[in-house]
Image: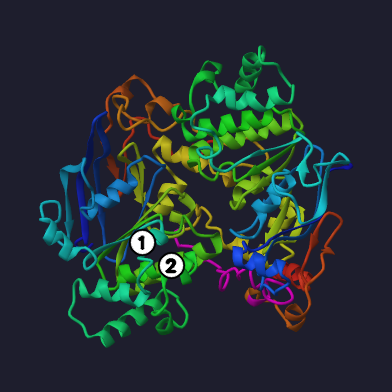
Amino acid sequence: MTDPVLRVKNLTTHFFTRAGVVKAVDGVSFDLAKGEILGLVGESGSGKTVAGFSLLGLVDAPGRIVEGSVKLNGVELTTLSEAELRSRRGREISMIFQDPIATLNPMLTIGQQMKLAIDAHEQMSPRAAETRSTELLTQVGIPSASARLRAYPHEFSGGMRQRVAIAIALLHHPAVIVADEPTTALDVSIQAQILSQMRNLAQQTGTAMIWISHDLAVVSSLASKLAVMYAGRIVEQGQTATLLRDPRHPYTAGLIASLPAMTKPGTPLTQIPGTTPSLLSLPPGCPFAPRCDRATDRCGSEPDMTVQDSRGWRCFHPVGQSDTVRA
Amino acid sequence: MTDFLKVDNISRIFGPNLTTGEKIAARLGGRVETRSVRAVSDVTLSVRKGETLGLVGESGCGKSTLGRVIAGILPPTSGTITIDGAPVMENGRKVTTRVQTVFQDPFASLDPRMKVGEAVSEGPIAHALTTKSEARSYVAHWFERVGLDPVWIDRYPHQFSGGQRQRIAIARALAMQPDVLICDEPVASLDVSIQAQIINLFLELTRDLDLTTVFISHDLSVVQHVSDRVAVMYLGRIVELGPVEQVFGNPAHPYTAALFSSVPKLVLDADVLVSFETIEGEVPSPLSPPSGCYYHPRCPLATQVCSATQPATQKVSDLRAAACHHFEGQLANAADG
């Protein structure tokens, strides 16, 4: 195994609000190899988006990375100055956001925006910039790309706008792309097109990706590795197929079992009782314990990550191989 | 079995918003170029008592508009809707309380400045299903029915989570004692673990209260789970209709087949990643739909007849219908594959 492009260790991001400290990300660690796609899965409020923002140093006050390290190609990002971070953002690590309407400037043509993104890191003649932009737009599946450079964002459909955002993220061939629910706002047929293109792009360009999503099915069809987040922590991680087939953490098992496809139509779905806890007032110990049917007194203290066969889980009472999905 | 909810030849056209100048010009007999959108086009369907009909399609296909027309929120441009023989609308006004709606976004559908108990009791009091003095116990009953603690009656919407708000919205709809429930993406804004809770509640309530339901969703797996029959919409038209297991199991319309194969599925039994069968292109603009069959520019089975003639809805089997010139070919395809 070669050195990972991205190594995240004990990443901890807290928000210091008047109501108290919100522990949005609490000790997140993972490695990402070249060309690998990691799916970061969690429900709303699980900290997955803040984790993604933290990687690029995009967390604003009152939030702050209080602990941990993010190493991109061996360079520690958390201690860099804003200027040093800027010189890397978009060039070595870039981000794709959920809402392509908010990402693009409505007043500039696609070509102008791509030129700006190129100029931020590279000296290039307008002609060369146009060639590069056209190339990338074609790569992400935009037909007659060179003509489309003169179009404004409103002239594109939602799916096409997201492709433009992806093309911009790819402009400088970054080592890592953080994608925050980029297909959530899109229709399934467009989502399928983009997912298959992203997979090909990761393979062709060697760009590693972190794909943040609440949708297990989307992530399972794209990512080779999964990390499941709950209440700011990664509660389980491992190879996608292993983790889905044989989940160890009761929360992962519950998420999989609660999908409609896992139950006979018309019969009650397996549900996880209760709701996700507020990150302001987490229960002591394992944050999932109040919703967990396997919880015991021991869960009053927090479990460490148990690592075994290149997978890991944070649970004292992991789900066994024999009773993976209890219907 | 008799048809309980009948939707007959419903069309809904959204006209342009004319500027004042254009209105004057039109009044003076001038020609104003109007561009209208046929959001729903000649839809005919029926739902039996106690049945759940799923309505699926991509954004802009008209499924929500159709739902709103059936619910009597939006008057149809043409066509009629009846519940048990009685019309839902007369002269552009809703004349029944027998159909109620649960909307997608429980944050937007509840008044933030109204106590949730009041929100639930407002309709029933207005329609004399309860009295002001009995409203509290009436609301408490419906709160319990949807799994909410009645002590929360005096709280405001912001004090509830998304899942709880959706329960309140369901209680508000059910407190009107409807026969027909229109659910417009009721679980789309909820987290997966909460989604399962609401779907279970929905299954339990529709069964116990013998509700006739139209369940609108873009999520095929949810629709597959809750529906008896399903209607697939594309650009305002129903392209396929039939029992859910038959339609999804062996689609007669190429669009249904393509839609179903685009849905990412949870892959449990393979270490290799699945390949998507993607639909080429995008949904055309409803302002200028293609000629003939609206799906023909994206359809692998399209022939000349498809661009020339709009396919009529044809019977596929006793319970199924599809609007496709080549549905037999599609069915044969699936049998081969």
Question: Residue B79: percent from the left, percent from the top?
Answer: 82, 54
Q: Which mark is residue A103?
A: 1
Q: Residues within 10 Å of mark 2 (few under 14, many from 20)?
A: many
Question: Magenta includes B272?
Answer: yes
Q: Nearer the viewer, residue B242 or B106?
A: B106
Specify the amino acid type for callout 1: Thr
Q: Earlier in the sequence, mark 1 or mark 2?
A: 1
The chain letter for the residue carrying disc 1 is A
Side of B322 relative to A38 (left or right):
right
- Judged by its main secondary structure, the magenta piece is loop
Residue that sits furthest to the top in the current view: B133
Say which residue label 2 marks.
A161
The chain letter for the residue carrying disc 2 is A
Question: Residue A47: percent from the left, percent from the top?
Answer: 32, 42
Specify the amino acid type for callout 2: Arg
Q: CA distance from mark 1 to mark 2?
A: 9 Å
At 50% from the left edge and 67% from the top edge, which residue is drawn? A157
Q: Nearer the viewer, residue A261 or A150?
A: A150
User: For the C terminus of chain A, which image quadrant?
Assistant: top right
Q: Residues within 10 Å of mark 1 (few under 14, many from 20)?
A: some
Question: Residue B63: percent from the left, percent from the top?
Answer: 66, 54
Side of B247 relative to A5 (left or right):
right
